[in-house]
Image: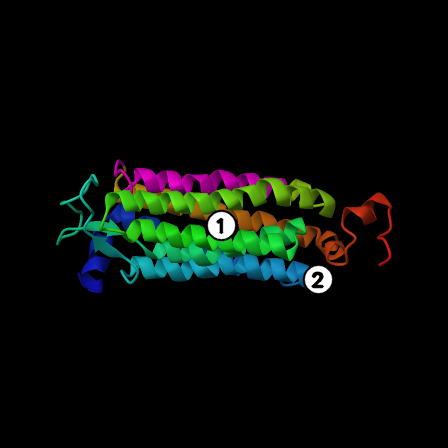
Amino acid sequence: MTQTEIFQFIQDNTLLSASLWVNIALAGLSILLFVYMGRNVEDPRAQLIFVATLMVPLVSISSYTGLVSGLTVGFLEMPAGHALAGAGAGPEGGVFTPWGRYLTWAFSTPMILIALGLLAGSNLSKLFTAVVADVGMCITGLAAALTTSSYLLRWVWYGISCAFFVVVLYILLAEWAKDAEVAGTADIFNTLKVLTVVLWLGYPIFWALGAEGIAVLDIAITSWAYSGMDIIAKYLFAFLLLRWVVDNERTVADMATGLGAASRGGAAPADD
């Protein structure tokens, strides 16, 4: 199918098309809002959190524009054993596969983790591990979606992707939670941690239930599920984080100088 045909297929499905255009509109509004919110931030660490967070809607608006235009969408013939093998939603057969979503996740979710890691006062080793595992999760998820040679191998890739996800969850729930206590940012970090973990768990669930997995959900319903989770896990997450950083820039600055919660408890940092 040509891009024009794919574009027309998307526009003809009102529910599917709306799930993409709504995200583009909200990403654009988020960019303007976040730039305005960060206009007076001066601390370098706070600025870095802002830049990482601002990249999330910037990546999303680019990616969703690619999806709605048909640039990063394809129709794949599913392997034997798949519920949609030999059938398809496209005018020429094949299953609607918006593989561009994985590009969105591969570039935007590391930015979310970088912002969270900086907020928690994480060291570079943990930050690097989280980001690499996250990228691995997205790339192997893409491999699961694009594998058409074997139904079993699709689920093997899915399992590998989930294994990378477990690493990310461990760092979020165990390592960074402790770091945030030391840094004095535990309250906001725990809120964002719960928001992130709960919503991110939804992605593999809807992958398994959607056309890429066992195909019990329609492509438009699956697209809205992904888009809805993106809206909350990215734009609402970013707003909550940036609002807190603006109101607590001094706390972020103390983290950068190595003071953290110690300065608020009255203890002085040890001399090196």
Range drawn in magenta: 190-216
Amino acid on which the number 1 mark rests in the picture: Lys
Which residue is drawn at the image coordinates 87% and 57% (left, top)?
271
Q: Is residue 207 magenta?
A: yes
Q: Image quadrant of residue 69?
A: bottom left
Quadrant position of the N terminus in the picture: bottom left
Find disc 2 in the rendering and name its residue.
43
Q: Looking at the rendered structure, which numbered label has been put on residue 234?
A: 1
Which residue is drawn at the image coordinates 41% and 56% (left, top)?
104
Residue 91 seen in the current view: yes
Which residue is drawn at the image coordinates 35% and 60% (left, top)?
65
Residue 28 position in % (x across, y down): 45, 59
Q: Residues within 10 Å of mark 2 (few under 14, many from 20)?
A: some
Q: In this view, does 240 lie to the left or right of 95?
A: right
Q: Is residue 68 left or right of residue 52?
A: left
Q: Which colour scheme is used?
A: rainbow
Q: How far apart are the two marked residues, 2 and 1, measured between alpha carbons? A: 23 Å
